Amino acid sequence: MSNNLVIVANRLPVDRVAQADGTPGWRVSPGGLVTAIEPVMRANDGVWIGWPGGTETDLQPFEHDGMSLVPMTMTQEDIQGFYEGFSNGTLWPLYHDLVAKPEFHREWWDSYVAVNHRFAEKAAELAAEGATVWVHDYQLQLVPQMLRELRPDLRIGFYLHIPFPPAELFQQLPWRRQLLEGLLGADLVGFQLPGAAQNFVRLVRQRVGHKTHRDLVYLPDGRTVQAAAFPISIDAAGFEELARSESVGKRATEIREALGNPRKVFLGIDRLDYTKGIYARLRAFSELIADGHLDVEDAVFVQVAVPSREQVEQYRILRDDIDRLVGRINGDLGRIGRPAISYLHSSYPREEMAALYRMADILAVTPYRDGMNLVAKEYVACKYDNEGALVLSEFAGAADELRQAWLVNPYDINGMKSAMLEAYQADEREITRRMKAMRKTVTQNDVAAWADSFMSELSDVPSSHGKAVRPAKRS
Ligand code: G6P
């Protein structure tokens, strides 16, 4: 019990990999969260609690790259009820504007409660007296309250990485009150956008009946909870450095050559998720070819779809739909050696992502709803020469900051076609002007600034109990 900072997230920041000698080992996940949190963890004897994936049962706490990691185990039933069920079959679609239909099952809820309780107990066991605990994302919304009951001495922060829905949608949830009360166990509840924080405060007032004023909730026991927006970001300098490197430059050239050196390359990189709008985006592109606005000799669309949640039915259906669409588009519009769409169902390391960003002329990010969308920010960070256009959905959190993108409504196929064509035809000055402005935003607001601002706000919350965490030492 010596940890002054405990990070609680559904996932550990490492993935299981086979090492050179064939034995299983760990590799830091490509996501940016770990980059942000690692320095704060080091400065505060931090520990990270999370699930490593799979159903292995004999995992012990371990150190990786100087980080203390505590793996949580899950049974097949936990995976089905808590992870695939309530987290990804109920909450995920409900919080993303009902892009798919959420299912409500009482057994899934029971499993969600039980797994949240196990995470809370583990955090309670590991946190030092007065420590700070930072709980992450929609899978663990009950942890703050459960943890406060076990350890009233702690300072607790919660951050939601995905959108928080308007009251009209949230109210469908049979367990709406329990979830709100779960979150109210925190001293600070962070969201991507101010609108999400407002949705939450409004729901707390309506559904739980607490007094609220602006971004504060007043609880009957005298505690206050603050709800505020902290738009997440990326390791901008790290991505730029990678993009500038010789090896990535070489790889970028290789990719373009392999594509037949077309005049312009469109790029899409997404987890294969129905919220991302991949289907409509590819259709829009294919119509531009069919209408004669683009020619497959000049333009190609590279779509990377990272496999995700493959046991969940909606995701399987989506995969089949996209497979079929890509096959049809290439069959109808491609020529020998010139498919209209180059489709990759795979995940890639950061270096390959940087090479893809560097070689692309137009990135299309067109989700129906997205908490932030870090792919858009990574692309901007990699475009150190200010060349590259971004077509971005209005419904991605990133659109609040990246105003100079070609903004689109992903439900409007004709609108998307026009924006993609405009981005394709834009002259260099226009592209540079827009990219310069977006780069300023992304480099000035990186993920370290995000973590610092959440942590310092959490230390300032008036009624919080624990000690403040020390800020990370940054070079
Ligand atoms: C989103 C969520 C994360 C989640 C990630 C990958 O970004 O906000 O909490 O970890 O997707 O999904 P997975 O289900 O594989 O963890």
Image: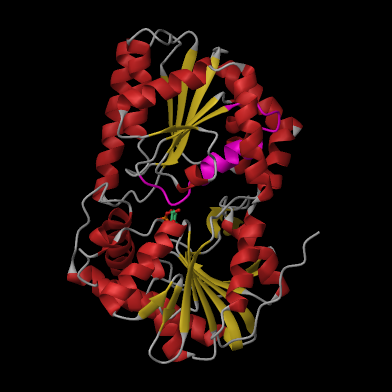
Residue at 24 percent across and 41 percent down: it is 317
Quick check: 75 left or right of 386?
Answer: left
Residue 11 x/y as whole percent:
48, 63
Q: Nearer the viewer, residue 76 or 396?
A: 396
- Against 435, residue 306 (above or below) is below
Quadrant of the snapshot with the N terminus: bottom right
| Residue 378 drawn in magenta | yes
Q: Nearer the viewer, residue 17 or 286?
A: 286
Residue 187 x/y as whole percent:
50, 79
Quick check: 375 left or right of 333?
Answer: right
Quadrant of the snapshot with the C terminus: bottom right
Give residue 143's quadrant in the image: bottom left
- Against 284, residue 239 (above or below) is below
Residue lying at the far right in this picture: please name it: 475
Residue 2 x/y as whole percent:
65, 86
Residue at 58 percent across and 52 percent down: it is 233
Residue lying at the far front in this picture: please name it: 213
Q: Is residue 180 visible?
A: yes
Residue at 44 percent across and 70 percent down: it is 214
Q: Is residue 59 visible?
A: no
Q: Which residues are magenta?
A: 369-388
- Against 412, residue 333 (above or below) is above
Residue at 60 percent across and 88 percent down: it is 130
- Against 142, residue 382 (above or below) is above
Total labels drawn: 0
Which quadrant of the figure shows ligand 1? bottom left
Quick check: 185 left or right of 260?
Answer: left
Residue 81 x/y as whole percent:
27, 66
Q: Nearer the viewer, residue 67 or 393?
A: 393
